[in-house]
Image (tube, grey):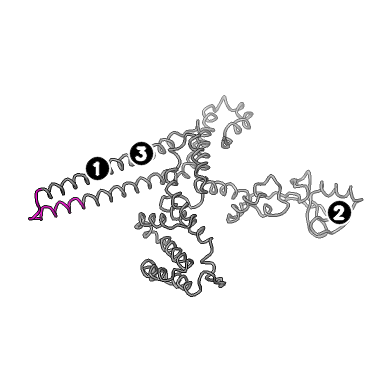
Amino acid sequence: MEIDPLPNGTGSNAATTTTETTVTATLPTATSNTTPSSKLSQLTESLKLEHQFLRVPFEHYKKTIRANHRTAEKEVSAVISSVADIADSNEISKDDAVLSLTSLVSRLQGLKRKLEEGSRTENLQVQNCRARLDHLESVDAENLSEWNNVRFKRILVDYMLRMSYYDTARKLAESSKIEELVDLEVFQEAKKVVDALKNQEVGPALAWCAENKSRLKKSKSKFEFQLRLQEFIELVRAENYMRAILYARRYLAPWGATHLKELQLVMTTLAFRSNTECTKYKVLFEPKQWDFLVDQFKQEFYKLHGMTLEPLLNIYLQAGLSALKTPCCFEDGCTKEDPLSQENFRKLAMPLPYSKQHYSKLVCYITKELMDTENPPQVLPNGYVYSTKALKEMAEKNNGKITCPRTGLVCNYSDLVKAYIS
């Protein structure tokens, strides 16, 4: 899968051949350095977009370090506490002491294995970070096209992973040999939670919340609260009302100070039940609530790992569409050559501002051709403007009559007034 080289490449050289032949004798160095400098400028701008590329593996590395540190701290604290208990005990027999110490040795050996495994994981993640840094450092003006092709594949893998096409993403990464440059392992962690939520299970998602509790609290996330609400709703759906009340007292009551309105709304379902026709409460029992939880988890997951909330593919496409978007793109007569004639591109471009047009171009509504001095615009009595070429062809086919394609007005060709472009 290849993409075209960026502008200012070979095409630019071909366009300036004539100029080069006239100035080579006097300015050889200036001519030879024009293309590399422009490519280096493009390269500098490209590297500004690689924040996520380095941030994600680094955040994953920090998370592994924290997890290993917690494990070691917990195990060492337990061992020290057990040793202190044995030392303080005056009535313990020799056999019991040996048995206790043997148990502690086994526990320490288990801790050693965990630390060694954690160390290997950390080293792999450090290598991953190093590989990405090397990849960024390897790019120069000579291999920019090849480097852009690799980035294009990285963007496609990122999109597939976000859209849950995990197997396809992995195959593309393996066939392109870019496993170290994409976040397969990170998204594999998310896959377990997403799959569970799609099967209407909140256990893995709650475990993920517990594992990242401090960071979710710092970002003021209410994802865990939404999971608890959904679990309560499922108990009400199953008509297990007493268990639902006990569950609310234990898990929902602590959220009352910050999310009282949502809590009150959900608690009212005990009176309305799952078969209610009241729209306000009926929506709480709809299956789409699980889809909402999946989307919310993805957003929280992206934030924690320093990812963009939108897929990189969407961001790059929107950057291009922002330069093409004009009011004409959303009219029925939009040409098929315009990307914004397609519905999917229109959705992407919807939140974008219209591009700033420094030079106006008049395009005929009928022929979609440019109106200029060779094909000047003409004005109908109703004020609509079309090209001379289109109106002449229409007049020849209809005995000198012109019919406005927008309003249906019929007039003679002699009634038209020539417009001048200034």
Q: CA distance from mark 2 to mark 1?
A: 90 Å
Residue 228, picture quadrant: bottom left
- Residue 38 seen in the figure: no
Q: Is residue 405 left or right of residue 108?
A: right
Q: Nearer the viewer, residue 292 or 367?
A: 292
Q: CA distance from mark 3 to mark 2?
A: 74 Å
Residue at 62% from the left image edge and 31% from the top image edge: 16
Main secondary structure along the magenta-highlighted residues = helix
Residue named by callout 1: 112
Disc assigned to residue 124? 3
Pick whichever of labels 3 and 2 is earlier in the sequence.
3
The magenta stretch is: 77-94
Label 1 secondary element: helix
Q: Amino acid at mark 3?
A: Leu
In the image, farthest residue toward the bottom: 271
User: Residue 200, how many percent across, how many down?
Assistant: 48, 57
Q: Amino acid at mark 2?
A: Ile
